[in-house]
Amino acid sequence: MHRFFVAPEALAQQPVVLTGDQARQIHRVLRLRAGARVILLDGTGWAHEALVLTSHAERVTLETTSRWRLASEPRLHITLFQAVLKGDRFSWVLQKGTEVGISRFVPMVCERNVVSDLAAVAAKRARWERIVREAAEQSGRARLPELAPPRPFAAALLAEPSTADSTLRLIPWEGERARSLRGALQSCNLADVSGIELFVGPEGGFSAEEVRQAERQGVVPVSLGPRILRAETAGLVAAALILYEAGEMEPLSMPIGER
């Protein structure tokens, strides 16, 4: 069944009414008509099976018939601070990162950024939010990953007080030789870590001064191995390795949901 994220308040009344882009997608793109069944996600972890009552390009009405709690969200909250990339590469990171299980994305502008205009980056927000939403629906996420406003690298490094004690902060860097990502994860008890912040640079990588600046803010440089990964690949590989190490990418131990 097709999945759609809707505002929790939309599910508080019957019938559920969808308008705008979602109505057009259901009616014109998917061609779903009365009697079709879909899954509505409220963004808080609940899935609702719903029956389409009426279907029109501007308005679709549905009746929810059952609900269940999804178990598809990782316990470990990963925030990816990703330098903005040229072309569609950043969009690709958002899409695939959502599929992997990243909980929050923070666009950054760094010293070697090809794209450096924060206003131009902010103008892409609506499109990026749509990409995240569609990827979350397709991949069975229970919650929509957050897309934070873009910021300079120095501002991104400032730790949020609420996460300072329980968050592991890592910066994959090709210049790191002594500490691997796996070594950094195994040096702490992941059960006591509620979140991990990953800082990934632009096409030209981080400068040595940026890495030193990150270290002064408690961010730990790590190596992802002997091969240099592209800017759009490094964060996804690191996130997948972290979730695997935390036991959260074992398909047999992660039921999609329970009714």
Image (spheres, rainbow, N blue to C red):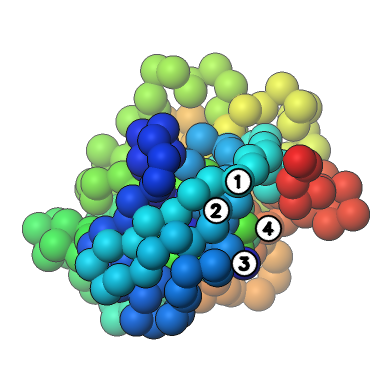
Residue at image coords 56%, 28%: 167
Residue at numbered disc 3: 1
C-alpha separation, residue under disc 1 versus residue under disc 3: 14 Å
Residue 50 is marked as 2
- In terms of image quadrants, where is residue 216? top left
Tag 3–tag 4 contact (CB < 8 Å): no
Residue at numbered disc 1: 65
Of the image marks 2 and 4, the number of the one nearer the N terminus: 2
Residue 225 is marked as none
C-alpha separation, residue under disc 1 versus residue under disc 2: 6 Å
Looking at this view, is 151 or 208 the one in front? Answer: 151
Of the image marks 1 and 2, the number of the one nearer the N terminus: 2
Tag 1–tag 2 contact (CB < 8 Å): yes
Residue 94, percent across and down? 44, 63
C-alpha separation, residue under disc 2 versus residue under disc 3: 10 Å
Residue 185, percent across and down? 73, 40
Residue 240 is marked as 4
Neighbor class of circle 4 (other Cα within 10 Å; few <14, some 14-19, many 20+) is some
Tag 1–tag 4 contact (CB < 8 Å): no
Residue 227, percent across and down? 65, 75
Neighbor class of circle 1 (other Cα within 10 Å; few <14, some 14-19, many 20+) is few
- Could you tell me which secondary element the residue under label 4 belongs to? helix
C-alpha separation, residue under disc 1 versus residue under disc 4: 35 Å
- In terms of image quadrants, where is residue 57? bottom left
Q: Tag 2: residue type?
A: Ala
Work out which quarter of the rendered image holds the C terminus and state it.
top right
Neighbor class of circle 2 (other Cα within 10 Å; few <14, some 14-19, many 20+) is many
